[in-house]
């Protein structure tokens, strides 16, 4: 689903990714862990198409297609979804209207006609129930005055609505209490299928108790330096990152 | 000949067309003297520091159109709120168009200023109300001197105007350049309600300058909602002088949608003359090219326990320039006044300009007055957020601009008008948004 080959990227002249390789197949969940400043969020934003980041080498393939030249919206149309670490507040646009616009713009780009209002409402109802979101919430301005947990739950609600092929969850666990974490993880697990892939970026192992990854990678200094199974996450939780740094620098 | 001299000398010819023995004519004669003395404002005056009329005063305007022009409704239908039953007072090149209008004298008067100024039965009201509030500045005086035609609306006590009233001024371009000076008088008596929509529309590229004066009287407990649609073409300029006098417990709101025109200047003045009055001044400005919109507002609080709310949003692209100058005066007697003013602006280009200036003169000590002004650009993070959800860049920008201006639209009480304004904004931004905000 996602093939990243020797990716180099910089922002404002500073190189952040320094030859990153990652292959995620459909039906898999991958976790990317690593210390602060390793480039985890940069990776998420680059795959989603943020223009401030400059790709200086390598390639990003989505289902075999090079997406490097595509805009953020074109990537979304092809099934890329990023759950933001810091979702942006957009006063004046309700959650419902935002989702209607996002889905219909995407359908338009895919050459499908707009979703009938009845189907849209049904879908909104189903997915909001999945994330245990109060209906009143949906007529509020997007993210405006939402708590940290509400914002994250809303991100996964959007994921449920958009049904992406590739979802990247950037620090979705940060700011969540244990109940919200359970709801969010449960939502993600229900959305998981043989046809999509999920990349979970996290600092802590905690989320991975709920969303169990097939593979765990350690991102350090702009590269994947170690890959393993979910046991690697437990080891990192126990021992921290220093031993990895030492291993690399040795 | 300069425009000022031309106008002063035209006054003699104008006098041939009106009854110079009527008391109103004394007011006109005084006004032409004031105009002769003061002339047009220049940038040397503080209130005109950022708006120059030089480019629009150089045309050789026709002051009195020679012929009556007509228009077919189907050709100008789009400028009307045609999906809504309304009264209509329509002018073509300054002259009343009976075939496009729908007036009434049934319980309320929705008719012509020319009737009100000449017929005896209106005389007591004219004596009481005409030209009682306009400032004695050059532009208002110029309008007063040539006051003859416009809309006259009278809602007697305890009456609800049964439908909104549209006042529309068309200019056809039959004259190579045209000066229009409509004069409106709106009297809303105790406990009565009215909604008015005003629009100026030039139908060709020939220069038009409109210098209008509107006097509005909201008596005790009256409600007046006034909506101005300013979406004219590149060669049409508008100087709108609106004066509103409010009595106890009245509510008056003016919404100004400034979406186009060459130079647009709104002089909007509220005078509160009783207690528990509410005044609302809302505006959305969206302009581009070399367009210029200047909002100059005044709210004068004279009595205790009154409120005023001003909310102006501006979006400026390319080389467009905007001015917001909002003055609030709170007299010593006007304790417990709540006066709010906010002016938020988005600049979409490096060459766009906004000059925003609050002026608060507060002489009472127990008041709540606040003002805020912001000037910013569209938030890039928010744009990326929307685009990452599949919303195209153009649509994302438009959605953010809609969202930015949305709270001003929320207070529009006529749904058909709200939806029309939404469409005008969508057209301006060249997008289709699938819902009304």
Image (cartoon, coloured by chain):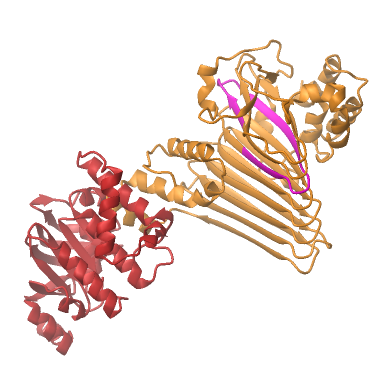
Q: Quadrant of residue A234?
A: bottom left
Quarter of the image for the N terminus of chain A: give it.
bottom left
Reply above or below: B374 against B154.
below
Q: Quadrant of residue B93?
A: top right
Residue numbers of the magenta segment = B199-227
Q: Nearer the viewer, residue A245 or B219?
A: B219
At horizontal 29% and vertical 63% (from top left) the residue drawn is: A155
B225 falls in the magenta region: yes
Question: Which hue is chain A drawn in?
Answer: red
Residue B280, position in %: x, y? 66, 50
A123 falls in the magenta region: no
Question: Which hue is chain B drawn in?
Answer: orange
Q: Is residue A133 visible?
A: yes
Reply above or below: B430 against A237.
above
At horizontal 79% and vertical 65% (from top left) the residue drawn is: B335
Q: Is residue B182 visible?
A: no
Q: How many discs appear?
A: 0
């Amino acid at each position: 689903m996602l093939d990243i080959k020797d990716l180099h990227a910089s922002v404002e002249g500073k190189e952040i990714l320094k030859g990153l390789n990652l292959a995620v197949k459909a039906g898999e969940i991958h976790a990317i862990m690593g210390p602060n400043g390793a480039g985890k969020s940069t990776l998420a934003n680059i795959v989603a198409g943020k223009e401030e980041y400059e790709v200086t080498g390598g390639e990003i393939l989505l289902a075999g297609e090079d997406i490097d030249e595509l805009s953020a919206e074109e990537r979304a149309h092809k099934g890329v979804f990023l759950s933001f670490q810091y979702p942006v507040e957009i006063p004046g646009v309700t959650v419902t209207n935002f989702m209607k616009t996002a889905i219909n713009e995407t359908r338009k780009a895919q050459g499908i006609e707009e979703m009938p209002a009845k189907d849209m409402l049904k879908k909104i109802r189903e997915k909001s129930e999945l994330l245990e979101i109060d209906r009143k919430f949906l007529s509020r301005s997007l993210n405006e005055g939402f708590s940290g947990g509400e914002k994250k739950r809303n991100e996964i609600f959007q994921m449920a609505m958009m049904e992406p092929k590739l979802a990247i969850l950037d620090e979705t666990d940060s700011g969540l209490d244990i109940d919200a974490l359970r709801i969010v993880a449960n939502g993600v697990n229900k959305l998981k299928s043989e046809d999509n892939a999920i990349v979970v970026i996290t600092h802590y192992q905690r989320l991975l108790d709920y969303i169990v990854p097939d593979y765990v990678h350690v991102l350090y200094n702009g590269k994947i330096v170690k890959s393993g199974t979910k046991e690697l996450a437990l080891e990192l939780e126990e021992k921290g990152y220093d031993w990895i740094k030492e291993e690399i620098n040795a | 000949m300069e425009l000022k001299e031309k106008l002063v000398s035209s006054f003699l010819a104008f006098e041939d067309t009106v009854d110079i023995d009527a008391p109103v004519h004394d007011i006109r004669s005084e006004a032409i003297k004031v105009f002769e003395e003061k002339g047009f404002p220049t940038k040397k005056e503080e209130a005109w520091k950022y708006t120059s009329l030089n480019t629009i005063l150089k045309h050789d305007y026709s002051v009195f159109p020679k012929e009556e022009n007509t228009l077919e409704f189907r050709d100008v239908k789009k400028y009307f709120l045609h999906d809504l039953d309304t009264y209509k007072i329509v002018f073509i090149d300054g002259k009343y168009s009976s075939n496009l209008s729908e007036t009434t004298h049934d319980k309320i008067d929705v008719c012509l200023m020319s009737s009100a100024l000449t017929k005896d039965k209106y005389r007591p009201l004219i004596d009481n109300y005409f030209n009682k509030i306009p400032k004695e500045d050059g532009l208002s005086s110029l309008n007063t001197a040539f006051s003859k035609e416009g809309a006259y609306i009278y809602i007697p006590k305890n009456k609800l105007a049964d439908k909104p009233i549209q006042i529309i001024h068309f200019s056809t371009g039959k004259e190579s350049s045209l000066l229009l000076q409509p004069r409106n008088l709106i009297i809303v008596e105790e406990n009565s309600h009215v909604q008015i929509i005003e629009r100026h529309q030039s139908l060709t590229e020939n220069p038009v300058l409109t210098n209008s004066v509107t006097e509005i009287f909201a008596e005790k407990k009256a409600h007046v909602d006034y909506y101005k649609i300013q979406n004219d073409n590149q060669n049409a300029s508008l100087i709108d002088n609106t004066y509103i006098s409010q009595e106890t417990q009245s509510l008056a709101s003016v919404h100004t949608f400034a979406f186009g025109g060459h130079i647009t200047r709104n002089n909007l003045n509220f005078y509160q003359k009783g207690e528990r009055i509410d005044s609302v001044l809302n505006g959305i400005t969206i302009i581009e090219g070399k367009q210029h919109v200047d909002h100059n507002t005044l709210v004068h609080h004279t009595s205790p326990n009154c409120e005023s709310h001003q909310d102006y949003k501006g979006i400026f692209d390319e080389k467009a320039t905007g001015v917001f100058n909002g003055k609030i005066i709170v007299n010593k007697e006007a304790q417990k006044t709540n006066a709010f003013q906010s002016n938020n602006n988005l600049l979409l280009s490096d060459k766009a300009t906004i000059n925003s200036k609050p002026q608060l003169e507060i002489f009472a000590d127990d008041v709540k007055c606040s003002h805020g002004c912001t000037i910013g650009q569209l938030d890039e993070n928010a744009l990326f957020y929307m685009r990452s959800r599949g919303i195209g860049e153009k649509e994302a920008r438009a959605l953010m601009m809609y969202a930015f201006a949305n709270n001003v639209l929320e207070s529009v009480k006529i749904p058909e008008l709200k939806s029309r304004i939404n469409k005008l904004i969508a057209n301006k931004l060249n997008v289709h948004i699938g819902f009304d905000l």
